[in-house]
Amino acid sequence: MSGEPTVPGRESADQFAGTDDHPSSISSDSHSVPRSPGAESRKRKREEYEMQLFNFHSRAVYATLKSIVTENIQSKSKKLCKALEDNKSYSGNLKMNEAQLIKAYYTASLSHLKDIKNIVNKFITVPNNVLADEDKLQRVQYTEAEFVNMRKKLEEFQQRAKRATVLNAALKEELQMTEQCLIHVDNNGRLIQIIENLIDAVEMVPNVRHKIHQLIKNFNQFNSYFNNGISISQKSLYNTIDDLKCVDYDMDIL
């Protein structure tokens, strides 16, 4: 895993550990069972999650414990060989016996290392219901069918929102037209009231229609004198009523 913290003593442990549990340099007959790519990927993801929450992960803890066990085996074996080296009778096959002793001790420790690994994986782990802050948005997971169904509902809501927007605009326009119609109705009502008041006033005055017609006739006659160019006397101009007894006066003399 990239970014994995350096574990003290890891270098010496790696000399005897080709895999997690079986050192290739100690036991040539032992073969580790390779993980499938999917299992290894899930393991890496769990370790990344452990790093986010704990700032370390289970693989590093197990590697540290394994290196401690390996260093102890090597240390005890070297001390034993050192003690035997002082005795000249054992100096012949001492180096070979040291390597075999380390191999035997390590082989005997494999079952214990496996138990240690299981314990580490049990206690250094993140429960499935615990999420980091950046992953809390993904708390609820949906299937493909649920996602397609929600997408259809979203598109339906979008179409309904568009129709509601168009309808809202049409209702606003209709409301404006209604307000204008109400204004026109109010003005028409005022005009009707004025006309009714005029009709009532005309009915209250007798012979108003006849007098109005006579007034129009006299105005037309008066206006015709100017239009025809006929010279008329001041009497005819100012006294249009027939058989009216009037006295002529020279207006210039006056």
Image (cartoon, rainbow, N blue to C red):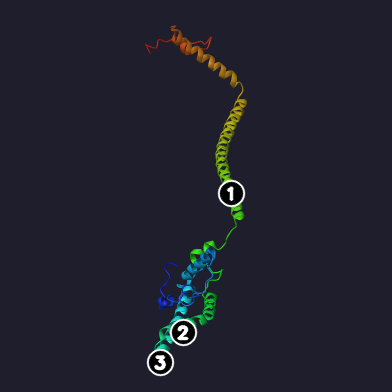
Q: Mark 1 points at which residue?
A: 157
Q: Position of residue 52 (x, y in %)?
A: 47, 69
Name above or below for residue 152 compared with residue 136. above
Question: The residue under label 1 is which amino acid type?
Answer: Phe
Q: Where, quadrant-wise, is the N terminus in this rendering?
A: bottom left
Who is closer to the viewer here, 18 or 202?
18
Q: Which of marks 3 and 2 is in front?
A: 3
Question: The residue under label 2 is which amino acid type?
Answer: Leu
Callout 3 touching callout 1 (CB < 8 Å): no
Q: Mark 3 points at which residue?
A: 89
- Residue at image location 58% in from the left, 43% down from the top: 163
Q: What element carries label 1?
A: helix
Q: How far apart are marks 3 and 1 (CA)?
A: 93 Å
Name above or below for residue 124 compared with residue 236. below
- Looking at marks 2 and 1 on the same chain, the residue that comes earlier in the sequence is marked by 2
Q: Distance between the residues labelled 2 and 1?
A: 75 Å
Who is closer to the viewer here, 122 or 116?
116
Q: Mark 2 points at which residue?
A: 101
Residue 95 visible here: yes
Q: Distance between the residues labelled 3 and 2?
A: 18 Å
